[in-house]
Amino acid sequence: MHSISAGNAKILFPFVLSFFIIVAYAPTFSGKFILDDKPLVKDNLFLREFSTPANYLSHEDGVSDENIPGYHTGYYRPLINLFYTIDYKIWGMKPSGFRTTNLILHILTCIMLYKFLRKILGKSFIPFSVTLLFGLHPVNTESVAFVSARNNILVTLFSLISLYYYLKHSKEKKIWAGLFSYFSFAVALLCKEFAIMLLPIIFLCNRLVVENRKILKDEILSYIPFVFILFFYFMLRANVIGSALTPVSASDPWKSLYFVPLLIIYNLKLILIPYSLHSFIIQYPDNYLSWKALAGFVCLGFLAFFLWRERKNKIVLFSFLAFLVALFPVLNILHTSAVTKVSMRWLYFPMIFLSFFCVWYLEKLIKINRLFIMICLSLIIIYFGTYSYVLNQNLWHDEDTFFRQEVLHFDNHYYIGGFAESLFEKGNYKEAEIYFQEAIHNYPRNAKNFINYSALLIDTGRSSDALFYLNKAKLLTMTHHVRGQWFNNMGMACFKLGKNDAALKNFNKAILFSSNEPQFWANLGGAYGSTGDYEKSLSVLKKGLDIDPDSFQLRKNIAITYMNMEDYKKALSNLEKIPPKERERDRQANALLMKAKEKLLINNR
């Protein structure tokens, strides 16, 4: 490696880095939308067309609960939808395309990290090795493979760019570098609020890393543009979500502070000892004197002792202090609306700063025994790459693999309703029913479990039981879309029981609550057709086609209506617009096609 010149390393290492990362993430190219990807990306109509800057800046991120007056998600990340729109224009609504973009952004972040480590610490090989460890680290698979976790990559990428060009401006006095640093900081902020922590990190960098520090007055002046950007950011944020901070009810502040050491050590454990990784749903221990809480204090004490011993080593101090600063937003000191206290994707941004410690430590170890350390480093890289490949293939690939792993392998009951839904969609009714009942028992306030279970009951001919469970969920809190699903299932149950008036009433309400759902239009149109109101049926079904021209169910219901009207030519035309593969999987569609052709043949004789 010493024979590679610095110039060649600049060209070669990014390509080698990209190759290894692409191999580890190969399964992501065939992956699907999972979990929050569906409401935030797949079903997000806002991202289908480019909007005005004002629209983006006034748009709240996440899924709002319209039933609760003044409800806010607490997330203000206006540029995320812009990035999704760019994706949509390039790939269409293909999950493989969105996942590819995530991977490209991850590689760009790694290249930027390598460039930054070289600028601060010099040399090539060890910064490259540490960057490769970051790029292949299995903890990062959640941020990269999970489309809607892209905000973690974007905030990290633009924060790194901002810090890099801030230092370049400070050293070389190039005005354009300073302007680019401020611009990148603003972009990072509008991608995720974690970028707020960049200002104290820049201060740490100036105090501990920069060799020829500015005088204090000049340093303070260099922070003013960042402060102005922060001021306008908080104004925009407060205007859109109603609060400068996340608007959630506060819990016990002393409890939050008490368990900070536990959260710090838990996050460090995920980075330093990555095994049994998955989608963690973790809360505080029930007991203040639990072994986990006490272990957190002990381990943090050892870390504090280590930093005190290395207090003259400014790179080590910067690395760990910047890591803790970057981790601050998820230590629950400032409360968030997250359902867990620890998540792998939250480590993407803080982990960048531990890279400085890794470079220093590797340089120290290699001086002791180069061959042994190189072997160990190679084994760790192989482990990280292999583990990331396994996670991308067997956990983050699609919802079926995700729910199966979480519920059956990790005994994570939080996703048991999703697992039951996945089994139901595959036609495994018997097993799905067992898990639906368990989900309802464990989470009696979750309306979706009742709604999805009612769909199974309707499909298995138990519409009266479906009405019973739907009525149990009637008073539970639901978003507009979920309430639309509730009315739709009520309509289906009534329709199956021959209560056509009640069915039509519920289907119409489903449309009112969620007018962008093609299936609701298909069901309403089918219900009108069954009552003999063919003109109303066609009107409703065609409105559904305006939303989704490729909907199989809408096309089939239109064909059925035309068949009932004895307009076989239009029925055949609609059936032929259904892709052959989809049509072949549905016996009724095939039968309708054959009948329409026969009737047309008879009429033409």
Image (cartoon, grey):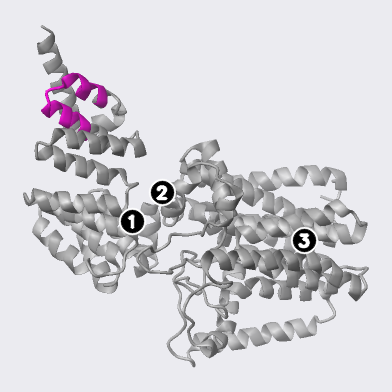
- Is 444 above or below relative to 594? below
- Is 496 above or below relative to 360? above
Q: Residues within 10 Å of mark 2 (few under 14, many from 20)?
A: some
Three-letter residue code for mark 1: His
- Is 586 above or below relative to 67? above
**Residues tagged 2 and 1 counted as in contact (Cβ below 8 A):** yes
Q: Earlier in the sequence, mark 2 or mark 3?
A: 2
Distance between mark 1 and mark 3 Cα atoms: 42 Å
- Horizontal relation, residue 576 to residue 526: left or right: right
Q: Determine which residue is flagged by label 2.
A: 43
Three-letter residue code for mark 2: Asp
Distance between mark 2 and mark 1 Cα atoms: 11 Å
Image: magenta residue range = 557-574
Q: Quadrant of residue 192?
A: bottom right
Distance between mark 2 and mark 3 Cα atoms: 35 Å
Question: Measuring 71% from the left and 67% from the top, which residue is drawn there?
Answer: 198
- Horizontal relation, residue 272 to residue 522: left or right: right
User: Which dot, 2 or 1, sits closer to the camera?
Assistant: 1
Query: Which percent across, then down, holds residue 360?
Result: 79, 68
Q: Quadrant of residue 451?
A: bottom left
Q: Main secondary structure of the magenta part?
A: helix
Three-letter residue code for mark 3: Leu
Q: Which mark is residue 163?
A: 3
